[in-house]
Amino acid sequence: MRKALRWLLALTVLIGTLSTAGAATAAQPEATTGSTDIKERLLAIPGMSLVEEKPYTGYRFFVLNYTQPVDHRHPSAGTFQQRITVLHKDVSRPTVFYTGGYNVSTTPSRREPTQIVDGNQVSMEYRFFTPSRPDPADWSKLDIWQAASDQHRIFEALKPVYDHKWISTGGSKGGMTATYYERFYPRDMDGVVAYVAPNDVVNDEDSAYDRFFASVGTKECRDRLNAVQREALVRREPLEKKYEAYAADNGYTFTTVGSLDRAYEAVVLDYVWGFWQYSLLSDCDTIPADAKTATDQEIWDSIDTISGFSAYADQGLERYTPYYYQAGTQLGAPTIEFPHIEKELIRYGSQPPRNFVPRSIPMKFQPSAMRDVDTWVRQNAHQMLYVYGQNDPWGAERFRLGNGASDSYVFTAPGMNHGANVAGLVPDEKALATARILEWAGVASAAVQADPSAAKPLARHDARLDVRDVEREQALRP
């Protein structure tokens, strides 16, 4: 690896001395302080290939494939193509390394830290999410260390091009991913901004979620949601007939979960969780006020809008097989109680991830994985920022800091859901978080360093580019 890195550095210097005047159009930002085209520099990296370039004013946006080993412990045992994107601003700016923990979007977008620092953005598709999946797929190579090693290799490949400060970020499973990356490669990044990242340290102890649902929002809203959820189970027979017709019309099957009945109950039991994950307290007015007098169609529509009746069909599960595999092997998954529903109405309860992964894929849970990460964060977190939403169920089990943490923070955005961000924090915390991100990225002005209340994003808001809405993953997924 060191020889390869020296070779890459030498190549970068050589390319930087060549004149390529006219290679970049006048409308595009300069790739470097010299005249080398950024596309040429990216494609000069061994293992990097271009899928497409898409135009966006003020940036250059590339969809790329990068060759990765299937097993970072045994690099000679095969490779696969991992999809990444690069939103290029200028090599003189800091770089934000983003992953959502799932597929990567091939549409230009800018995450909140990227806007704050006015930087470049590298986005990574998580291994085993198609098309970034080895063929054949050895699922034992899907774990948090292998994924962190993917990020590490991408960083090492791109650091000679983007040689200023780097900050990693991600939301939900992406926030978890940014945390695991920092745990295994703590010297790569100059800061971490993790949004709404769950932290299920002890998989069998989930009472924090039950306490959350007993107090979130208002009693009126909780009662409305609970009543609709219960009523959907009371009316299981007529609504399942509707579900059968819906499945037939759409070609849905239920081989993985086992039956339409299992899928139906899973969708219904996700309903209350899904509301608080994706909606706000003000949205309670959209929930039927009296579930007992609501029509079957009104109950169906409310459940479908929030949980999605396609979620546990084979066709809905297939894309998320890598997530459920990880939940059942390392990440853990919440098991919650439903005290407002009579036991005889619930046949399966909170089903384990094993039920959502094809039986041909072996799974074995590793209880030490999350304990290790949690201990590391408490004792070693440095320049890490966690942002949670007050009304987001996933924040019931969150990352916390211990005495060993330094220059690290955990903030909660009042009234916000799974889309919580720095912009939604109370003013003092918003200013402090923004100031720390600017400082970690090496772009904090003297005024901001002297007074964090002066901190503001360096780039103007772009309604198309700046993604602020919660990334909706129907069903109970972070």
Image (spheres, helix red, strand yellow):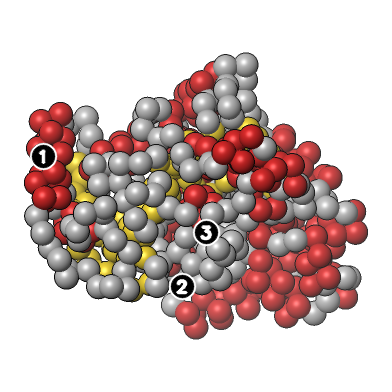
Q: CA distance from mark 1 to mark 3?
A: 33 Å
Q: Which residue is mark 2?
A: 252
Q: Nearer the viewer, mark 3 or mark 2?
A: 3
Q: Is residue 290 above or below residue 123?
A: below
Residue 172 visible in the displayed image: yes
Task: Count residues near mark 3 (Cα–Cα under 10 Å), then give few for <14, some for 14-19, many for 20+.
Answer: few
For residue 391, side relative to residue 471 (left or right): right
Identify the residue at horizontal 84%, vertical 45% (top origin): 215
* Sequence-wise first label, 3 or 2: 2
As shown in the figure, which amino acid type bears the numbered disc 2?
A: Tyr
* Sequence-wise first label, 1 or 3: 1
Residue 318 coordinates in the image, percent (x, y): 40, 60
As shown in the figure, which amino acid type bears the numbered disc 3?
A: Ala
- Comparing 431 with 244, the one in front is 431
Proximity of marks 1 and 3: CB atoms separated by less than 8 Å:
no
Identify the residue at horizontal 12%, vertical 63% (top origin): 20
Q: Residue furthest front?
A: 446
Label 2 element class: loop
Identify the residue at horizontal 65%, vertical 71% (top origin): 305
As shown in the figure, which amino acid type bears the numbered disc 1?
A: Ala
Which quadrant would the N terminus be assigned to in this image?
Answer: top left
Residue 10: which numbered mark, if any? 1
Task: Count residues near mark 1 (Cα–Cα under 10 Å), then give few for <14, some for 14-19, many for 20+.
Answer: few
Q: Which residue is mark 3?
A: 459
